[in-house]
Amino acid sequence: MAEQNCANCGLRAKYDHNPKSLLGRFWRWHINWCPSWKGYITSLPPEERARVAEKYNFTKYQNL
């Protein structure tokens, strides 16, 4: 599989800038099933994973 670019994702930047935008909402919906996002977030150290999961209100990965 190719290297994940989730940390530099343009859609993630759109969400960070304006979470209520159409592209921002699409990105937030998309991370619920995206295999690349799952690989990215599970590869983070526990502290960083918890910070990212909290920032995006992503309870699925807050307690891994």
Image: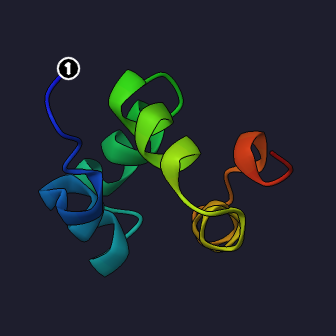
Q: Which secondary structure, mark 1? A: loop
Residue 30 sits in quarter: top left
Q: Is residue 39 above or below residue 16?
A: above
Q: Which residue is at the front of the view, 38 or 24?
A: 38
Screen quadrant of the C terminus: top right
Q: Residues within 10 Å of mark 1 (few under 14, many from 20)?
A: few
Residue type at tag 1: Met
Q: Nearer the viewer, residue 53 or 42?
A: 42
On the image, which quarter does residue 57 sit in?
bottom right
Residue bearing mark 1 = 1
Percent position of residue 47, x then y: 70, 73
Q: Is residue 33 left or right of residue 50?
A: left
Identify which residue, 59 or 1, lies in the foreground. 1
At horizontal 20% and vertical 20% (from top left) the residue drawn is: 1
18 relative position to 64: left or right: left
Q: Name which residue lies at 78% across and 48% down.
A: 59
Return the residue found at the far bottom. Answer: 17
Q: Which of 39 and 25 lies nearest the eye of the viewer?
A: 39
| Residue at x 33% of width, y 45% of height | 27
Q: Is residue 40 above or below residue 48?
A: above
Q: How is the image coloured?
A: rainbow
Question: How many numbered discs?
Answer: 1
- In the visual, does 63 lie left or right of 50? right
In the rendered image, the vertical position of residue 3 relative to residue 22, given as above or below: above
Q: Position of residue 29 (x, y in %)?
A: 46, 36
**Residue 40 placed where, x, y %?**
42, 45
Residue at 35% of width from left, 74% of height from top? Answer: 16
